[in-house]
Image: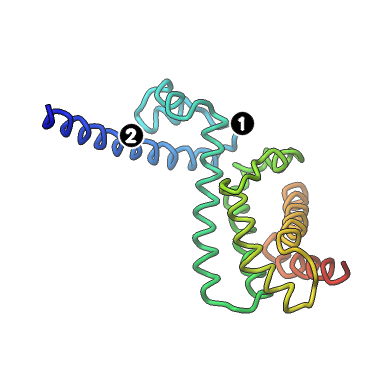
Amino acid sequence: MLLENYSTRGSMSFKQKIQELKRELLLEEATNLFIRDGYENMKIAELAKNAKVSVGSIYAMFGSKEALYNNYLMGQIDYYMAIVEKEFEKYTNPKKMLIILTEIKFSAIIKNRNAIKESFSDPTFFLNVSLDDDDPLMQMYTYIAEQVMKPLSQMMYIKKNPLEMFFIYDGITLGRLRYWLVAGGDLMSSVEETVDSFLAIIEKS
């Protein structure tokens, strides 16, 4: 009986690993399709065909196309935050870190333009994101507030909450991104101008 239970646990663990691998492969292929086609035009049937699984198994794993899209977004956040953390290790000046952060953010938007344009066209999208402490987005906000905004406030002698500073920065960058999605142009050339706009606003506040 003991051996049977041990065998069952071992088998379940192996199945879980296989399931997780399938999930990662599906997300990888879904990411490619979202980037290529955008949310509206991305077809679950094509994802199933490319991944050699059934449509039903995709819905069983993720629940809905929207949930699959949210998993894609969270995966992209994890990916780019790893880049941000690695880059931050090279600098101590918060203004330089802010420029690096903006460059990474803008380059991520350029790469994922088709996939995120529907989200950016909905002004309530980011208001509906959970702000619980264990939410990945909130963890990212808090990390940037501590790593960049807090030392920036100290350097500029600004008595403002670092998290509030982050949300002001986020609003300015989102405005710039929405304008770029409508008007086009060279987004990367506006990095320093965007950072300067943020610094001017918080300096006057």
The picture places residue 45, in percent across and down from the top left corner, at 46, 25
The picture places residue 170, in percent across and down from the top left corner, at 72, 56
The picture places residue 16, in percent across and down from the top left corner, at 31, 35
Label drawn at residue 26: none
- The structure residue drawn at horizontal position 60% and vertical position 58%, both measured from the top left corner, is 107
Q: Is residue 140 visible?
A: yes
The picture places residue 23, in percent across and down from the top left corner, at 39, 36
Mark 1 lies on a secondary structure that is helix
Q: Which amino acid does label 2 sit on?
A: Gln
Q: Which residue lies furthest to the right in this view?
A: 204
Label drawn at residue 40: 1
The C terminus, quarter of image = bottom right
- The structure residue drawn at horizontal position 75% and vertical position 59%, both measured from the top left corner, is 164
Q: Residues within 10 Å of mark 1 (few under 14, many from 20)?
A: few
Label drawn at residue 19: 2
- Location of residue 1 by image quarter: top left
170 or 40, which is in the foreground?
A: 170
